[in-house]
Amino acid sequence: MPSHMSDIGFQLNSEDDFHQLASQAREEGEALEADDGTYIRWAPGEGIELWAQLDRDNELIGLNPHFRGNGLMRVGLVQEVSRPEGTPLDGAFHAWANPSEDDPETGEFPFCFDVPDYQLRKVQLPSILQVQLAAFAHELQSYESDEAYEQSQSEEIKFASESFIPSGLFSPEGGGTESPLAHALFTGHVRETSIVTNPVTGNGFCWAKVRTLGGDVDVVADPVLLNGLLVEGGVVSGSFWLSGFLIG
């Protein structure tokens, strides 16, 4: 079944598979001390990263994936986001995409993204910087051209070929939420794409650098999600979880 892990080539079919992967990340990764425990960054290659989390007793409490690509988005960081169900080492930011020159609290749209090394990022808020944003696909549709994308839209409300809806900011009832999720619906143009082989498992996954409203995003997807091939110059549309690595 597709998951955030299978989006980067790790097929986990059981709880034992998860614990084996977490143990490997812990053994082979780099330890980074934080206020409430330790992050272990395992980067086996091809942009793949796993961030294990250990509490102060060195017990495993979390394992988050990231993909280090070359897509960058200029953002205005506005507020820290914490969630009651998360671990002490989890964290996220509420941000604006492509803010004006000197105002972090304006831009194309607000959204939320998770940060794999959250406690290591000591930033003053509000502030403007760049984020390398990885979008892990939940659903994905691909189109060879703008024309094919336009023809696929049969609803009265049609979305542009570069559009972004911060779905994680809204509750299922349609109102806002106090604990936003790092979820989004977006559409964009494929600038680069390839099939990447996970060097640990040998499994392939799809990667694309996508220009959407606000900037560039690195999309990763389990191949079973695709309804066709990703092509440069084509369009992709879907729902995603967002993991961001702060730059600068």
Image (cartoon, grey):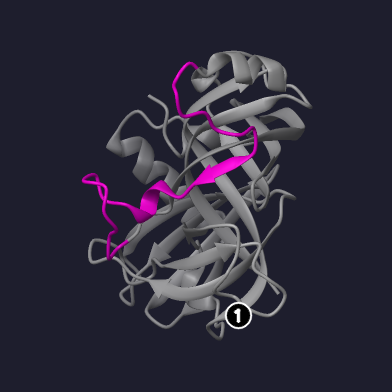
Q: Residue at x 60, y 80 (%)?
A: 127
Along the horizontal axis of the image, is 81 left or right of 77? Answer: left
| Residue 27 or residue 137, whichever sits in front | 137
Q: Which residue is drawn at 50% across and 63% down?
A: 115
Q: In this view, does 100 lie above or below 71?
A: below
Q: Which residue is drawn at 66% across and 14% down?
A: 148
Secondary structure under the numbered disc 1 in the rendered image: strand
State the residue position of label 1: 127
Determine the main secondary structure of the stretch shown in magenta. Answer: loop
User: How many labels were placed on the picture?
Assistant: 1
Residue 9 appears at what percent x and percent y?
A: 55, 32
Does the magenta segment cover residue 118? no
Along the horizontal axis of the image, is 28 left or right of 18? Answer: right
Does the magenta segment cover residue 155? yes
| Residue 219 or residue 8, whichever sits in front | 219
Q: Is residue 142 above or below residue 134?
A: above
Residue 237 appears at what percent x and percent y?
A: 56, 30
Category of crowding for the residue at label 1, using alpha-carbon neighbours closer than 10 angstroms: few (below 14), some (14–19), many (at least 20): some
Along the horizontal axis of the image, is 165 left or right of 233? Answer: left
| Residue 50 or residue 3, whichever sits in front | 3
Is the C terminus in the top left, top right, bottom left or bottom right quadrant?
Answer: bottom right
Residue 225 appears at what percent x and percent y?
A: 50, 21
Residue 60 appears at what percent x and percent y?
A: 34, 61
Is the N terminus in the top left, top right, bottom left or bottom right quadrant?
Answer: top left
Q: Is residue 166 above or below residue 159?
A: below
Kind of residue sitting beneath label 1: Ser
Query: Which stretch is magenta?
Result: 154-179
Q: Single out the residue that lies furthest toward the front.
A: 156
Q: Which residue is drawn at 41% across and 63% down?
A: 53
